[in-house]
Image: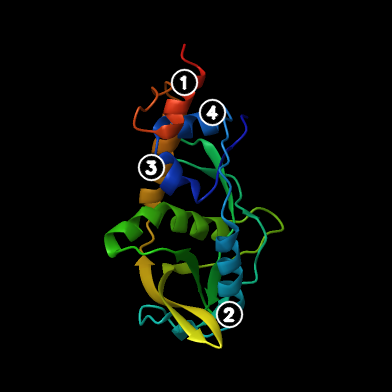
């Protein structure tokens, strides 16, 4: 049996949905280019999680979230059991969540984002949130299980204003976007991704800065 494909939930929105050649090189040829991640976002993430941990779900400022308690202290890199696409090809999911909500009889998974998006753009993250749901309902051995996961959402923070109260403080507005769960559509998406990875290598994309760098470095 061949080794299962391993996917990170966050790689779909900005990997597969971005430059197809760069995504192919990453997954098939193991070509990794790390630009780093600004430390300020890690700091904001830490502050957000500390503030929202064990808060009631009403703190998300949305009437679309059922009553429950927000949990942000699960920092473990999570992994699903071996799953199968529509063509019976094995894959696993591995990644971290920002938060889940314990509703006693069911769960919600919430992703925090420091960005300004609208309802239409929030659909970009459907595959990421659906990955989280499946990953926690069907975990690998010795990982936390959340079952059933009935709700998925994105909680967005956007800087709005800088105020002075003894020291400067940054005010942020928040928005909550519900993400619909659709396991059949998700598995079709995974099947399409694996079809792509098992197909011919795509050409370099001249609109992609990384592909242009590859062209300059390896002109032949």
Name which of mark 3 and mark 2 comes first in the sequence: 3
Q: Residues within 10 Å of mark 3 (few under 14, many from 20)?
A: few
Few, some or many C-alpha atoms within 10 Å of disc 4 (few <14, some 14-19, many ≥20)?
few
Q: Measure how far apart labels 2 and 1 are at the Cα level.
A: 47 Å
Q: In front here: 8 or 52?
A: 52
Q: Is residue 26 above or below residue 150?
A: above
Q: Could you tell me which residue is drawn at 51 percent across and 82 percent down?
A: 68
Residue 201, compared with residue 62, is above or below; it is above
Is 42 situated above or below 17? below
Question: What number is the disc on residue 51?
Answer: 2
Task: Mark 4 and mark 2 in contact? Answer it, CB < 8 Å.
Answer: no
- Residue tagged 4: 28
Question: Measuring 59% from the left and 37% from the top, which residue is drawn there?
Answer: 4
Quadrant of the rendered structure where residue 141 is? Answer: bottom right
Q: Please name the colour scheme applied to the rendered image.
A: rainbow
**Residue at 27% across, 59% down:** 120
Sooner in the amino-acid sequence: mark 4 or mark 2: 4
Instruction: Give the residue number, with chain letter if any, for mark 1.
Output: 216
**Disc 3 on helix, strand or loop?**
loop
Closer to viewer: mark 4 or mark 2? 2
Measured as percent of width and height from the top left, residue 140 is found at 65, 53
Image vertical order of residue 19 relative to residue 13, above or below: above
N-terminal of the pair, mark 4 or mark 3, is 3
Residue of label 3: 17
Q: Mark 3 near mark 2, Cβ–Cβ under 8 Å?
A: no
Q: Quadrant of residue 86?
A: top left
Q: How far separated are the C-alphas under marks 3 and 2? A: 32 Å
């Amino acid at each position: 049996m061949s080794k299962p494909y391993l996917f990170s939930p966050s790689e779909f929105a900005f990997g597969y949905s971005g430059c197809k050649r760069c995504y192919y090189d990453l997954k098939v040829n193991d070509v990794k280019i790390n630009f780093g991640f600004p430390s300020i976002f890690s700091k904001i993430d830490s502050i957000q999680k500390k503030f929202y941990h064990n808060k009631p779900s009403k703190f998300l400022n949305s009437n679309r979230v059922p009553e429950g308690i927000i949990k942000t202290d699960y920092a473990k890199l999570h992994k699903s059991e071996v799953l199968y696409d529509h063509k019976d090809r094995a894959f696993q999911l591995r990644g971290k969540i920002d938060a889940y909500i314990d509703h006693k009889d069911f769960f919600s998974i919430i992703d925090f984002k420091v960005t300004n998006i609208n309802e239409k753009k929030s659909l970009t993250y459907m595959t990421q949130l659906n990955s989280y749901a499946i990953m926690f309902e069907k975990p690998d051995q010795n990982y936390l299980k959340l079952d059933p996961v009935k709700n998925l959402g994105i909680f967005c923070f956007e800087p709005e204003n800088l105020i002075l109260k003894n020291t400067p403080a940054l005010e942020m507005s928040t928005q909550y976007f519900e993400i619909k769960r659709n396991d059949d559509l998700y598995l079709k998406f995974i099947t399409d991704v694996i079809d792509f990875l098992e197909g011919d290598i795509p050409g370099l994309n001249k609109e992609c800065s990384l592909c242009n760098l590859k062209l300059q470095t390896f002109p032949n």
